[in-house]
Image: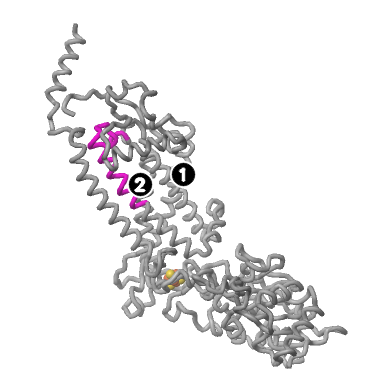
Amino acid sequence: MIAPVDISKRAPTIYEQMVSRGVSRRDFMKFCAWMSAYLGLRNTGVSQIAKALETRRRIPVVWMHFQECTCCSESFIRSSHPIVADILLDKVSLDYTETLQAAAGHQAEEILQDTITKYKGEYLMLVEGSVPLGADGVYCVVGGKSAVDTVHEVAAGAKAIIAWGNCACAGCVQAANPNPTRATPINAIIKDKPIVNVQGCPPIAEVMAGVLVHLLAFDRIPQLDHLGRPKAFYSRRVHDTCYRRPNYDAGLFVESFDDENAKKGYCLYKVGCRGPTTYNSCGVIRWNNGTSYPIQSGHPCIGCSEAQFWDNGPFYQRIANFPGFGIESTADQIGMTLGGITVAGLAVHAAMTNVRKRHEIGEQPGENAEAAEKSNQEADKGGAS
Amino acid sequence: MNQPRNFIRVYVWELPVRLTHWINAACIVVLGVTGYLIAHPPGYMTATEASFGYWFGIVRFTHFVAAYTFVVALVFRIYWAFVGNKFARWRSFVLLTPKEWKEAVRVAKIEIFQVSDETIEPLGHNAVSSFTYAVLFLLALFQVISGFGLYAAMSHGWMPGLFSWVMPLFGSEQTLRSFHYAANWLFILFTVVHVYMVFYTDYVDGHGGLSGIISGWKFMDKRETAVPVASQSVPPAK
Ligand code: SF4
């Protein structure tokens, strides 16, 4: 069981915790360098982070799980830097998390209650998963309490909230049309707390660590964009940092996954790549210790860090199905149908015109020529007289 | 109509109206074609290196330039809707009174369903086309707003920046894209119908509508102009 660290006398700093876990000074500095690089801080950022971690007391953290698949946690513990998972998550800061804590049942509930009462207004609330509001929230109940009640209760005393992943930021797959449980993201439920949306399904481990370190080290939330995402990681599209981009601009596209173009590594736009509408750092930080990311392995981006990405399918089609027109109908099919109807209507109209308006159109070319000439001559005569 | 008709020449479309009409027409064609290409780039197998080509970039660039041009022309046309002659005024495009709606129904009966043989006052737009252009205007507005909403994310300019509120309304950029692209089809439908109707009125009424948008002059039956305005059901453009 993880007991909450007693910080009533003098809480150890994060650095002290790390040292007691056997982390060398050198590794600690390497960690700080990594983090400041990810956060896009300048050179002096390294010492800023180091100093902050050396002097700051640990911040209590509760990590809540609701409608989700735990892929955010999975991503986080696979972070390329062991300090992140081992120290930050496991030992130093985490007071409550359903998936990783040893405690269960009443013990676990007690810890949560302890933390939120003892550290009221100080703790960080991390949320993984969306919250179902349908049927009074019965679709997600933990320890006899519905997720929505828990969210309100825990958020009330939180200093700030980090919404992990697409579920907590935008509802992800369970909020996809028709959203049977009314899965709702945290930012639609809690309005009076600073919320950091860390998008992705899951978010990149280094991004998660970066955000957390920022909060722990600087005690304030990072700069956010208009959707509440940290600018350091979500200000550019996957498309803008994609190494296949020159192929896009040159109009060199993969047509199907087994063609010559795919082997040459052309742009995946035509096989459905959502990179042009997806804001994330995959192209820069990549995954699994910077090894690769979907596009690098030949698979189009599915836009997992964007709201509604499940409703904008199919993933392997450039033009998404048009909302409201049922399955399998793109704007093109609808447009072509309407176009066909229009052209047919016009053809009927043209035929009808030649029948119904015949008298107005006149009969033959030159039909009125004589009359016109005559009237001109009359006019001339009139003018002469 | 087998007796000779007497036409008088009337100056209807002022130069700014004609200019914006053709600039808009060109922009709509360019935007439509490049927009379609952006959605469906033609694929070809080639041995060229990416560094030698930039055609898709040029297609997108053209789309953006045409979009800016379209906006400028649109803004100017809106201005002209307040200072131009009565045929260019905004009031001639909106059906407000029940009388105007009744006229629209009458015109539809004559020109579209052809169940009536009455004649309509031909100067300016008739009530049905006024309505269509008002809808087209809204469509153009939507296209400008959604387009610049999409563009805002990849631009640092202040002008696209004014549209950064658009995307959140639609939930995601991909959804916004779908709408922006679907609206392209409505422009295609409009263009087909519009061109057809121009041919139709030119063919049937003989008022020179087709050349009118180049020269500005239209032709009107003396017989029709002689009818006092008050006795006509509605002057379509006031
Ligand atoms: S593969 Fe995707 S992200 Fe990369 S250039 Fe092509 S469309 Fe953009």
Measured from the top left, where is residue A274 in percent x and y?
Answer: 46, 70
- Magenta span has A341? no
Identify the amino acid type marked 1.
Val
Residue type highlighted by circle 2: Ala
**Residue B20 position by quadrant:** top left
User: Of marks 2 and 1, which one's residue comes earlier in the chain?
Assistant: 2
Q: Quadrant of residue A89?
A: bottom right
Residue at left 56%, top 52%?
A: B162
For mark 1, what is the residue? B72
Task: Judge from the rendering whether residue A55 lies leftward or rightward of residue B72; answer left or right.
Answer: right
Q: Is residue B190 magenta?
A: yes
**Residue B118 position (above or below residue A29):** above
Instruction: Point out which mark residue B221 bears.
Output: none
From the image, tell me which residue sits under label 2.
B26
| Residue A212 seen in this snapshot | yes
* Circle 2: element type: helix
Q: Which residues are magenta?
A: B187-212
Magenta stretch: helix, strand or loop mostly: helix
Please tell me whether residue B235 is drawn above or below residue A201 in the rendered image: above
Name the spot of residue B13 as percent of width and height, x first.
37, 32
Q: Residues within 10 Å of mark 2 (few under 14, many from 20)?
A: some
Residue A47 in percent (x, y) is at: 73, 77
How packed mark 1 is, by other alpha carbons closer than 10 Å (few <14, some 14-19, many 20 or more), is some
Structural distance between the alpha carbons of marks 2 and 1: 13 Å
